[in-house]
Image (cartoon, rainbow, N blue to C red):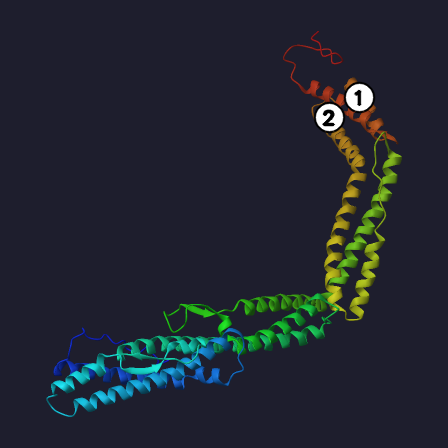
C-alpha cells in the first residue's frame, strides 16, 4: 500500500558531552523529518483495508493470537509516537528561546535529544507480562517503533493478501460445484447411488469448511515470506483449494462420460447386439464346420466349440433396461464392460472357427498344390508319363475321398511333386530310372 513503508531509521550522532548549536539544529531537522514519516506511516496503517477487516472479523487460530498482539503493538505505537511528538516539541521550544542557545540550554537539549529521559511502557507488555515502564532515548524509541510497525504490517498485509485471493476463488469454485451438482442430478448421479455423487458431497463440505477457515484464520493459509518484505517472497497457500478443484474436475469428466452414454446409448446398444449376433453366428458356423471336418478328415484332432455365453445376453438385457429407466450412471460402466467383453467374444469365435477349419484348409492347400504341379507338367508335354499319372491318381484319390487321411495324402502329393520335378530337370547326366533315380 502506498504510504505504509517502514519508518526511516535514526542514525544518531557520535556521543558528545554537550552538543553544539549547529549539531542541535541538524538533529532537530532530522527528527522533524522522521516525525512526519512516522505519522504518515501510522495514518496509512490506520486506514489500511486489511486492518479494518481484521478488526471486524471473528478470528480464530493463529490469526486470533497474532492479531491480539498486533493490536497491542499498534496501540503502543501511538503511545510512543505521542511521547516522541512531546519530546520533539519540548526540544523545539527550548531551542526557540534564544537565537544563540546558552550553555545551559545546549546541555538541556543534549539530554532531551540523546539521553534516556523518556518514560514509556515496556515492550514486555506485548507478551502478556504486567505493564512495566522503562527509560528510552529518542533513537531507541524509533528503532522499537520500526520493529513493531513491520510486525503489524506483516500481519495486516498477509491477512489482506489471503482474503483478496482465496475467498473469491472458493466462491467461483462453489458456483461451478453448484452447476455440476445440478447436471449430475439430471443424469442420476446422486449421493448413495453413484461414487461421483458421494464425491460431490465431500467437495461441498470441504469448500464450506475451507471458506470458513480462510475467513476466520487467514494467516494459517500463507506460505513463505511476508508480502510486506521481499516482492514475491510468499503467496496464499492454495493446497486444499487446488485439491478440491482437481476432485471437482474429475467428477465433471465422469458426468460428461455419463452424458455421452445418454446421447450414444442407442447406438452403442445396437452395436453390442450386432457384435454378439456375429459372434453367435460365427460359433454356429464353427460347430457346423467341426461336424464337416470330423466327417471328411481322418486322424485329425478337431477342438470342441463352446456355446454362446448367456451372461452377456443377460447383461445386454439389463443395459437396455437401464436405458429405458434413464439410469445413465449405471448404464455407463455396464456398457464399457460389455463392449470390451463382446469384442473379446467375437474374436474368440473367429479363432475357434479358424482352429476348427484348419484341417480343411490344409486339404485345400494340398489339392491346389497337386493341381498346380499337374498343370506345370502338362505345359512341358509330360502329362502322359505313366509314373506321373500313377502318382497323381493316388494323391487325388486320397484328397477327394472321405474321410481323408491328411498325413497319407500329404505324403502322396510330395511323391508326385518329386516325380514331376525329376521329369522337368534337363537330362544332363543321361537317362535315369525315374523310379529309382539311378543313371542307366
* Element assignment for label 2: helix
Q: Determine which quarter of the picture holds residue 421.
A: top right
Where does residue 112 sit, x and y in percent of width and height?
22, 83
Percent across and percent down for residue 253 are: 63, 66
**Front disc: 1 or 2:** 1
Marks 1/2 in contact by CB < 8 Å: the verdict is: no
Q: Looking at this view, is 200 or 267 the one in front?
A: 200
Q: In this view of the protein, can residue 2 be seen by the observer? A: no
Q: Nearer the viewer, residue 432 or 31?
A: 31
Q: Which quadrant, please, contains the C terminus?
A: top right
Lateral position of residue 305 relative to residue 164, left or right? right
**How dense is the environment of label 1, judged by Cα within 10 Å: few (below 14), some, or many (20 and up)?**
some
CA–CA distance in space, label 1 to label 2? 15 Å
Name the residue beneath numbered marker 1: 391
The residue at the point 59 percent across, 76 percent down is 174
Q: Is residue 71 above or below residue 307?
A: below
In the drawing, does residue 72 fall left or right of residue 38?
right
Query: Which quadrant is home to the N terminus?
Result: bottom left
Between 213 and 432, the residue placed more toward the observer is 213
Please determine whether, in this image, residue 89 is positioned above or below residue 145.
Answer: below
Residue 251 coordinates in the image, percent (x, y) = 64, 67
Residue shown at the point (30%, 75%) measured from the top left: 143
Give 391 or 223, whichever is nearer the viewer: 223
The earlier-in-sequence mark between 1 and 2 is 2
Confirm whether residue 331 shows in the render.
yes
User: What label sits on residue 378 in the rendered view?
Assistant: 2
Name the residue: 70% across, 70% down.
197
Q: Kindly indicate the quadrant of the structure image that contains residue 154.
A: bottom left
Q: In the figure, 39 relative to 276: above or below?
A: below
Q: Residue furthest bottom?
A: 97
Total marks drawn? 2
Amino acid at each position: 500500500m502506498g504510504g505504509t513503508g517502514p519508518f526511516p531509521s535514526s542514525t544518531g550522532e557520535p556521543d558528545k558531552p554537550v552538543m553544539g548549536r549547529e549539531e542541535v539544529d541538524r538533529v532537530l531537522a532530522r527528527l522533524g523529518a522522521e516525525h512526519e514519516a512516522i505519522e504518515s506511516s501510522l495514518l496509512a496503517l490506520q486506514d489500511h483495508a486489511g486492518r479494518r477487516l481484521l478488526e471486524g472479523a471473528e478470528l480464530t487460530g493463529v490469526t486470533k493470537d497474532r492479531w491480539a498482539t498486533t493490536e497491542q503493538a499498534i496501540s503502543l505505537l501511538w503511545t510512543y509516537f505521542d511521547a516522541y511528538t512531546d519530546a520533539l516539541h519540548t526540544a523545539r521550544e527550548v531551542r526557540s528561546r534564544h537565537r544563540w542557545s546558552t550553555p545551559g540550554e545546549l546541555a538541556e537539549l543534549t539530554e532531551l535529544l540523546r539521553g534516556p529521559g523518556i518514560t514509556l511502557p515496556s515492550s514486555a507488555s506485548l507478551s502478556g507480562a504486567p505493564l512495566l515502564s522503562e527509560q528510552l532515548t529518542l533513537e531507541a524509541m524509533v528503532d522499537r517503533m520500526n520493529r513493531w510497525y513491520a510486525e503489524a504490517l506483516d500481519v495486516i498485509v498477509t491477512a489482506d493478501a489471503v482474503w483478496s485471493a482465496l475467498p473469491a476463488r472458493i466462491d467461483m469454485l462453489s458456483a461451478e460445484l453448484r452447476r455440476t451438482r445440478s447436471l449430475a442430478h439430471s443424469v442420476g448421479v446422486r449421493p448413495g447411488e453413484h461414487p461421483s455423487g458421494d464425491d460431490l458431497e465431500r467437495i461441498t463440505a470441504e469448500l464450506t469448511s475451507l471458506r470458513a477457515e480462510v475467513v476466520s484464520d487467514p494467516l494459517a493459509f500463507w506460505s513463505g515470506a511476508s508480502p510486506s518484505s521481499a516482492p514475491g517472497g510468499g503467496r496464499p497457500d492454495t493446497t486444499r483449494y487446488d485439491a478440491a478443484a482437481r476432485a471437482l474436475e474429475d467428477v465433471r469428466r465422469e458426468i460428461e462420460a455419463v452424458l455421452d452414454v445418454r446421447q450414444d446409448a442407442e447406438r452403442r446398444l445396437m452395436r453390442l447386439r450386432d457384435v454378439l449376433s456375429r459372434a453367435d453366428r460365427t460359433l454356429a458356423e464353427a460347430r457346423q464346420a467341426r461336424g464337416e471336418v470330423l466327417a471328411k478328415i481322418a486322424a485329425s484332432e478337431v477342438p470342441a466349440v463352446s456355446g454362446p455365453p448367456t451372461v452377456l445376453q443377460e447383461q445386454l438385457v439389463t443395459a437396455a433396461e437401464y436405458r429405458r429407466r434413464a439410469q445413465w450412471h449405471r448404464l455407463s460402466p455396464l456398457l464399457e464392460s460389455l463392449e470390451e467383453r463382446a469384442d473379446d467374444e467375437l474374436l474368440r469365435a473367429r479363432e475357434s472357427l479358424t482352429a476348427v477349419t484348419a484341417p480343411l484348409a490344409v486339404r485345400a492347400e494340398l489339392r491346389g498344390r497337386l493341381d498346380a504341379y499337374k498343370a506345370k507338367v502338362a505345359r512341358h508335354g509330360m502329362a502322359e508319363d505313366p509314373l506321373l499319372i500313377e502318382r497323381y491318381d493316388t494323391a487325388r484319390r486320397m484328397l477327394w475321398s472321405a474321410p481323408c487321411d491328411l498325413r497319407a495324402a500329404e505324403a502322396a502329393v510330395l511323391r508326385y511333386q518329386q516325380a514331376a520335378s525329376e521329369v522337368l530337370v534337363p537330362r544332363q547326366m543321361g537317362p535315369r530310372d525315374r523310379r529309382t533315380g539311378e543313371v542307366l
